[in-house]
Image (cartoon, helix red, strand yellow):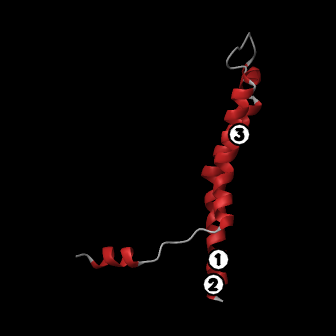
Amino acid sequence: MNAELVTELEAPLQQTTTRARLVSALGPGAAFGGVVWGIVQPYRVTLLHPRGEGFWWLFVEPPLLVIAVGLFFYFVVAPGLLRDLEEEEDDATAQ
């Protein structure tokens, strides 16, 4: 049996704090809100019925921007925040 595998199995599972769960849920929550907004008010998404609109009118749609910001937060901002929260928690437990 591999000793490293046994050590990993015996290591306690890392508990996530409420703040970490909240931070990791903000991005998907915002993206979900944008999807719901697009479903509830489909006339806001002119990609569905462009009627001769220009590129910027089609590109800058509020529900699509909310979805994009939620995904950006989840993939770019949240990992750094979660690392900082983990380091802060480690420092607090070490003292």
Name which residue type carries label 3: Gly
Name which residue type carries label 2: Thr
Judge by depth and name the residue closer to the eye, 55 or 45.
Answer: 45
SS assignment at label 2: helix
Does any portion of residue 68 appear in the rendered image?
no
Residue drawn at x 63%, y 51% is: 74
Disc 1 to disc 2, C-alpha distance: 6 Å
Camera-near label (1 vs 3) is: 3
Residue drawn at x 62%, y 87% is: 94
Judge by depth and name the residue closer to the eye, 27 or 55.
Answer: 27
SS assignment at label 1: helix
How many neighbours does mark 3 have within 10 angstroms: few (below 14), some (14-19), or many (20 or more)? some
Residue drawn at x 22%, y 76% is: 1
Mark 2 = which residue? 93
Answer above or below: position of 49 versus 89: above
SS assignment at label 3: helix
- Ranked by sequence position, the earlier of labels 1 and 3 is 3
Mark 3 = which residue? 33
- Ranked by sequence position, the earlier of labels 3 and 2 is 3
Q: Are marks 1 and 2 in contact (CB under 8 Å)?
A: yes
Judge by depth and name the residue closer to the eye, 35 or 73.
Answer: 35
Answer above or below: position of 72 versus 39: below
Answer above or below: position of 24 versus 42: below
